[in-house]
Amino acid sequence: MAAPGSISNYTLNMITLYDFETKLPGKALSPFGWKIRFALNIKGLQHKTHWISFSRIAGQLQELGLPRSSTVPNNYGTYHTVPALSDTSTGAKISDSKLILKYLDETYPNTPQLYVRPPGNAEFEALMAEAFALPFAMMRPIWIVTSPKIVLEGLDGADAARYRPRVEAALGMAPEEFIKDEESKERYVREAREAFGVADEWLGKAKKVYGGRWALGHEITMADIEIGSALAFTASILGEEDELWKKITREWDEGRWGEYWGQIKEYTKLGERVVSEE
């Protein structure tokens, strides 16, 4: 099995990850897209990123022949969303991050297996289940406090117009108003601080049980990808020179988030750039 991050023997394959593009520091935004990106990089699978417009996700994915990601319409009334993936080695076209992650493990068995589980280990299963519950609590308040930046700086034109109602519904006001509401911003930062603290406690508990460099031992697993996606999401919006990011990585939980980000950041490479023609 190839070591995490090393280029595997599957160099002739062309895997394409479909995601929507922003002007934010990290370019990508979707935490589900970050999970797939982590998986591809950990497995050493060469890939490219086909960037599409947020306002045209459904139309562009349909034009590219990608399947629906859901049998019921999402918040935008469509059945298609990112991430999606195509693989020329098998002809596979897949939507939905869970299906993509399962496909990558099954199709490339000689790469690090992300869903590996010791048989009959109830404690491992319990810790893994807890890990899957952590990212939403970490990301939700971060998204709230940074959502004005996403819609005002990260997106343009039709993309910003399509994203804005979601932001206004969450904030209960226009993003331009929220920027001036210091009390609300501080409240959400406190919520994020608490959620990151819970995740830090989980990491400490897991490492006491399994030791090793990663959350559940010496091998990187989906637990690390789950937590890593929350960090990548946050770093992508804020940028690493932002004061809040510096607080998260240098001050929160005695700087342990900075150490963890230092480990997992190497697996955030975006892949060769491809853009849909309008």
Image (cartoon, rainbow, N blue to C red):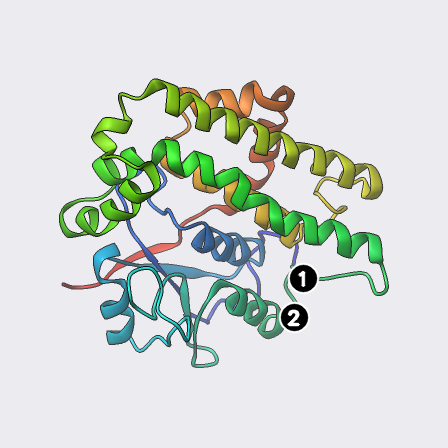
Return the x and y of residue 88 as percentages of the image width and height. 42, 76
Q: Can residue 15 be seen in this view?
A: no
Left/right of residue 39 with respect to residue 76 in the rendered view: right
Which residue is found at the position 43% from the left and 21% from the top?
A: 186
Describe the element under mark 2 as helix, strand or loop: loop
Q: Residue 109 carries which label?
A: 2
Instruction: Say which of 39 and 235 sits in front.
Output: 235
Left/right of residue 76 with respect to residue 255 in the rendered view: left
Left/right of residue 19 with respect to residue 112 in the rendered view: left
Left/right of residue 155 with respect to residue 44 in the rendered view: left
Return the x and y of residue 176 as percentages of the image width and height. 21, 29
Marked residue nearer the N-terminal end (2 or 1): 2
Badge 1 is on which residue? 115
Which of the 4 image quadrants contains residue 156?
A: top left
Instruction: Say which of 31 and 180 sits in front.
Output: 180
Which residue is found at the position 38% from the left and 31% from the top?
A: 145
Q: Can residue 23 be seen in this view?
A: yes
Which of the 4 image quadrants contains residue 24?
A: top left
Instruction: Say which of 8 and 82 sits in front.
Output: 82
Which residue is found at the position 61% from the left and 34% from the top?
A: 260
Seen in the picture, residue 90 relative to 253 is either above or below; the reply is below
Q: How crowded is mark 1: few (under 14 residues within 10 Å), some or many (20 or more)?
A: some
Quarter that holds the N terminus: bottom right
Q: Residues within 10 Å of mark 2 (few under 14, many from 20)?
A: few
Residue type, label 1: Tyr
Instruction: Say which of 153 and 86 sits in front.
Output: 153
Residue type, label 2: Pro
Which residue is found at the position 13% from the left and 47% from the top?
A: 157
Describe the element under mark 1 as helix, strand or loop: loop
Residue lying farthest to the right in this orientation: 120
Return the x and y of residue 32 as percentages of the image width and height. 46, 55
Return the x and y of residue 22 as percentages of the image width and height. 28, 45
